[in-house]
Image (cartoon, rainbow, N blue to C red):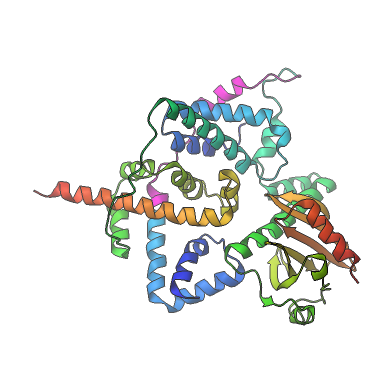
Amino acid sequence: MLPHLDAAYNLARWLLRNEQDARDSVQEAYLKAFRAYASFHGENGRAWLLTIVRNVCYSHLRRVRRETQPEEFDEQQHVPVDDSLETAARLRRELDREQLDAALAALPEEMREVIVLHELEGLAYKEIAAVVGIPLGTVMSRLARARLRLQRELKQRLAQEDSHELP
Amino acid sequence: MNCPEIRRLIEPHLDEELDVVNDAAVAAHLENCPACAEFALVFTEQRRLLQEKLTRHGAPTGLAAQIRAALPVTENGSRGGQFAIWRRMAMPMAAGLALAALAGNWWGAQAARKEILVDELTSAHVRARLAGHVIDVESSDRHTVKPWFAGRVDFAPFVPDLAAEGFPLEGGRLERAGGRTIATLIYGRRKHSIDLNVWSGPPEPANGAAVHDGYSVMGWRAGGLNYTAVSDIAPDELAGFASLIQAAK
């Protein structure tokens, strides 16, 4: 019986964006958890384990980045702000799973991880603060920024689709 | 609160992460402001999209077995066999309490109950600061703070003046945690602050010092009341504060 295995794998898979790396990192994290069990005082097993998974993933990313070029994020995209209910409903109707996943994968890790922890794993702000190691107020503002950025990515994908449909 | 302030709190409101007072304020505003109500609807629609269509990657088959095979062999010969370890890690706190109570394990049940109480009081401390609702009655004068609680709680909290010792009184607020109505006194300490929670009723298990989610917690019982102080100052500093309160007359 290995508790929280799906949550651990989901976080690793989203951070590393690769199945084999995610498998290896989750295994390493469970071995670490097993050895470090003395330091666990029974507060919140899931948050404790996810903290270890996250640390393993980040050291993997640091190792890989040293060998390749660091990722560059284009913060200069200008998409008109459209916060209408109509657009929100249209996004929900027209975008498919593949487009959603691609949009989240395109986010910087610090934004990707809070969306994964909050929307997919259902962690409370306090648990996210513990896993990511940031103050609670930062969790709130980072979630808001991540959501905004993701909406922008999604709207861009919708716009691309519109232009493809033109004759 | 004005519309921009409300909009900042809509996400934590929908996440049920706000304190009682702010939560009620946001709910009331949404009833009367169509623009903010639409903002909340857009937000809900956006969130549904994420929850419906983002992939939650489940662990691939075989991964659990692969990990178990890599675990070190324990003394009794079974691999990673200390199942108690994984079981304890899997249990949410409330389940720990139910399990201990079922097993007739009084000490275990007390420990789990303490864990829940400390968690509630720490959450209250954090929530209040997150939403900027730390104080209901703002005053450094204990003769203002003490009467404010009359009619709000069923006891008269003792409000010592510790300004000379470096813990100026900042005010009070009403809290609810696990069915208890709590008088919370707020004391300052340099740039930090301390919640001193006081409530009546039977003795509760939150006594002694603890560190929870990085916050210092110190509980004791005196004069038929339960006291638990929560703060982000260091544990020994909070212990100093606790002994000053206990010594005050």
Residue in the foreground of this view, choosing between B224 and A153: A153
Q: Residue at x 61, y 47 (%)?
A: A130
Q: Residue at x 53, y 39 (%)?
A: A7
The residue segment tinted magenta is B49-75
Visible in this render: residue B202?
A: no
Residue B66 relative to residue A66: left or right: right
Q: Quadrant of residue B153?
A: bottom right
Viewer-side residue, B167 vs B218: B167
B132 vs A88: above or below? below
Q: Quadrant of the N terminus of chain A?
A: top right
Residue at 39% from the left image edge and 67% from the top image edge: B39
Residue B180 seen from this side = yes
Where residue B221 appears, as percent x and y from the top left, is: 87, 62
Q: Does A94 lie within the magenta span?
A: no
The residue depicted at 49 percent of the width and 35 percent of the height is: A12
Q: Is residue A108 left or right of residue A161?
A: right
In the image, residue B65 lies in the stretch drawn in magenta: yes
Q: Is residue A143 left or right of residue B209?
A: left
Above or below, A162 against B229 in this view is: above
